[in-house]
Amino acid sequence: ALGGIQGPPTGYASIDKPWEKYYPKEVVDFFSELHCLENIRKDVDDGRVGILKADNEIYSFLQDLENVDEIVERFWDEHQRFIKEWYLKTQRKDDVIVSASPEFLLVPICRRLGIKHLIASHMDKRTGKLLDKFNYAEQKVVRFKERFGDAKIDCFFSDSESDRFIARLADKAIKVVG
């Protein structure tokens, strides 16, 4: 459960008013219901999402798993086939994967694909505790520059709006859909 987070048990009256100026009511209603406190609580309780707390601990499936490495390898055995063909055809030796995902989840697929450069969130795979700042949004720029200085990014691909900060470093940024 969400512990001390307060809010109405259902509904979303607190967030609908400002957005109605900019978006159709149907759009506001859809996203407001999707992200209302009741649905967030259900997703957390069902184990679909974790909550990042002030002490950098994320509650997730990790705490109950015994062999995380084996589970991650099996995941990639099943899901590697979903990597888009266009990427496999255009992959370069100097590709860099920059992700908010925990590093231990991506190391196996990077190894399989021959990707040598990975910048991801450092998380203890046994406890789910973040070991440093979450590699998200502006933090991706910080971590990239720490590792590569002012190196040029020729082309950047992302499916996330939160990557707009690092995308600004690229000569060409492409939004991936699907």
Image: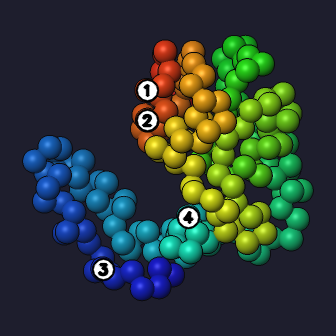
Residue 122 position by quadrant: bottom right
Check residue 168 in the rendering and tell me which mark sits there, or answer none.
1
**Residue marked by disc 2:** 165
**Which residue in the rendered view is the most extreme toward the bottom?**
4
Distance between the alpha carbons at the discs numbered 1 and 2: 6 Å
Question: Which of 155 and 105 lies nearest the eye of the viewer?
Answer: 155
**Residue marked by disc 4:** 49
Check residue 78 in the rendering and tell me which mark sits there, or answer none.
none
Number of other residues with Cα within 10 Å of mark 1, as a class: few under 14, some 14 to 19, many 20 or more: few
- Which of disc 2 and disc 4 is earlier in sequence? 4
Name the image quarter holding the C terminus: top right
For the point 20% across and 68% down, which residue is it? 14
**Residue marked by disc 3:** 7
**Which residue in the rendered view is the most extreme toward the left?**
21
Location of residue 176 in the rendering, given as x and y in whole percent from the top left corner: 51, 27
Left or right: residue 7 versus residue 159 is left
